[in-house]
């Protein structure tokens, strides 16, 4: 892991500038352009040729030959998956499902109306969108937790049609555990198709795929770019980048527990970002030693080593106030605070997707079980974006009903504003009603 030591105000400002720049350079921009161009070609092919293009692209990128009649997973296959999975694991998924559902039910906004003394009615009606597509990644791992985190909020919101897509990366289909989770969570249809072609199929619709109102869920760079490209025709949750964690730790922290949070983040992918911010220089070498000791016995040891070497950073700051300021600028997806007063530090961090407070709260408890969504803003988007919630699958309709008395009272103000904008018909539309 790279180390950045901050001892002066100038060094701190330089660290902030480096964070704001995002590490973009000519090579990365050229790579992104090439990825965007190839993804645009995939999206265009699906839009123009429908299922035929989806089948061709699935065979090209996933190595699986599927005829369109095999795209969709049957109800019998879903039921069989539940029977095939270890009952204790099914029970664990059901408990996690209950926690996630309970949490998301609590943050649903409600429709409202109010009537003023003159009879004017103002309000909002909140209704679920008609359909949602949820993307569950495959390939390097099977993200059963992402099934629950995607589908449960849509179910809580009341979305009637929830279509799940996932790559056929397990023996030419979707892993039984993923299918079992989809059935528990309440997907109405499931397709064994992934990648940018699945995103395009959900956005535009094909002979087999329904066009949906919104697409949610994380994926690789091509899935992310595809979501951006189709966002003109359907809503998307957010653009997901590599997973990331910041650990703020002081000299009261257990070095091994700090190391475990960095290791847990690094095992996601080679691009995962694991960052330690500490005012305790003596902690750093202890954490490094614990990382090496623990990493050797982990299943993804090589991937972890690569991620930490290429993306890992240790910031040695002057105090916890500086740690909070730097973290707010990083705006990480996850924040683990392992200090003597974690709540006090958290109160000084403005931008973060999910914060876990105290040494006994690992990020994993949020990833899998506690209830808050693990589909979070990445790449500094926590400065303006939020975790996925049930309200993301609902829409607001404004309600206005005026009495003649209320309209007459407002007429003068409306006329002045309309006339200064040059819209005299607007003013007259009010005037004709009250005269």
Image (tube, helix red, strand yellow):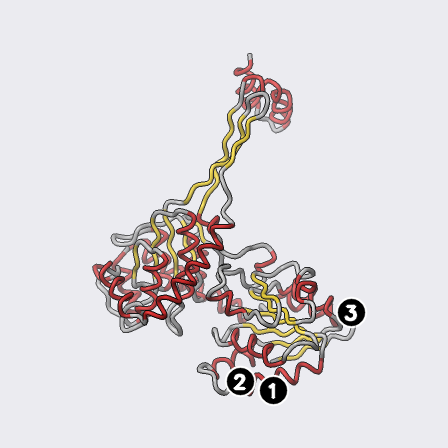
The residues bearing labels 2 and 1 have C-alpha atoms spaced at a distance of 9 Å
> Can residue 37 be spotted in the picture?
no
Disc nearest the viewer among 3 and 2: 2
Q: CA distance from mark 1 to mark 3?
A: 30 Å
Picture coordinates of residue 419, whole percent (x, y): 62, 24
Say which element carries label 2: helix
The label number, if any, that marks residue 294 in the structure image:
2
Q: Residues within 10 Å of mark 3 (few under 14, many from 20)?
A: few
Residue at 37% x, 52% y is 203
**Where on the picture, by quarter, is residue 186?**
bottom left
x 49%, y 47%: residue: 108
Q: Which of the labelled discs sits on residue 289, or is there none?
A: 1
Q: Label 1, secondary structure: give it.
A: helix
- Image coordinates for residue 258, horizontal then vertical, percent: 60, 77
In the rendered image, which residue does mark 3 sit on?
9
Judging depth in this view, the residue of 151 and 430 nearest the camera is 151
Q: Position of residue 297 (x, y in %)?
A: 48, 86
User: Extreme top residue here?
Assistant: 435
- Closer to the camera in the image, 306 or 254: 254
Q: Nearer the viewer, mark 1 or mark 3?
A: 1
Left of 422 or right of it: where is 46? left
Q: Residue at x 52, y 75 (%)?
A: 264
Give the left or right position of residue 299, taking residue 250 as reference: left
The mark nearer the N terminus, 3 or 2, is 3
In the image, residue 420 lies at what x, y percent? 64, 27
Q: CA distance from mark 3 to mark 2?
A: 35 Å
Examine the rendering and report whether any part of residue 434 can be seen: yes
Q: Secondary structure at mark 3?
A: helix
């Amino acid at each position: 892991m790279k180390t950045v030591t901050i001892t002066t105000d100038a060094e701190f400002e330089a660290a902030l500038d480096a964070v704001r720049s995002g590490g973009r350079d000519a090579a990365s921009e050229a790579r992104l352009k090439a990825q965007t161009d190839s993804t645009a070609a995939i999206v265009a092919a699906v839009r123009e040729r429908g299922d035929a293009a989806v089948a061709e692209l699935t065979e090209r990128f996933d190595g699986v030959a599927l005829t369109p009649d095999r795209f969709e997973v049957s109800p019998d296959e879903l039921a069989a998956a539940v029977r095939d999975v270890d009952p204790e694991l099914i029970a664990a998924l059901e408990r996690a499902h209950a926690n996630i559902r309970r949490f998301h039910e609590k943050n649903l906004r409600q429709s409202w109306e109010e009537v003023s003394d003159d009879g004017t009615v103002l309000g909002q009606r909140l209704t679920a969108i008609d359909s949602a597509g949820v993307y569950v990644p495959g390939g390097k791992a099977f993200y059963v937790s992402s099934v629950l985190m995607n589908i449960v909020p849509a179910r809580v919101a009341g979305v009637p049609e929830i279509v799940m897509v996932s790559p056929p990366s397990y023996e030419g289909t979707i892993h039984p555990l993923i299918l079992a989770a989809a059935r528990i969570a309440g997907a109405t249809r499931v397709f064994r198709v992934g990648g940018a072609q699945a995103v395009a199929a959900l956005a535009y619709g094909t002979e087999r795929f329904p066009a949906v109102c919104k697409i949610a869920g994380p994926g690789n760079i091509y899935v992310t770019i595809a979501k951006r490209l189709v966002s003109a025709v359907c809503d998307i949750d957010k653009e997901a980048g590599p997973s990331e964690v910041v650990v703020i730790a002081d000299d009261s922290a257990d070095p091994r527990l700090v190391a475990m949070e960095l290791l847990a983040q690094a095992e996601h992918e080679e691009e995962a970002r694991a960052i330690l911010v500490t005012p305790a220089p003596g902690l750093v070498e202890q954490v490094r030693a614990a990382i090496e000791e623990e990493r050797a016995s982990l299943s993804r040891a090589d991937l972890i080593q690569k991620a930490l070497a290429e993306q890992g950073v240790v910031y040695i700051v002057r105090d916890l106030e500086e740690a909070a300021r730097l973290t707010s600028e990083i705006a990480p997806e996850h924040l683990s605070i392992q200090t003597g007063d974690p709540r006090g530090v958290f109160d000084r961090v403005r931008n973060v997707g999910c914060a876990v407070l105290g040494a006994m709260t690992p990020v994993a408890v949020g990833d899998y079980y506690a209830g808050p969504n693990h589909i979070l803003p990445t790449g500094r988007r926590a400065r303006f974006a939020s975790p996925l919630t049930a309200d993301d699958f609902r829409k607001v309709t404004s309600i206005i009903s005026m009495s003649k008395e209320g309209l007459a009272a407002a007429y003068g103000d409306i006329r002045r504003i309309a006339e200064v904008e040059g819209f005299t018909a607007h003013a007259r539309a009010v005037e004709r009603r009250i005269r």
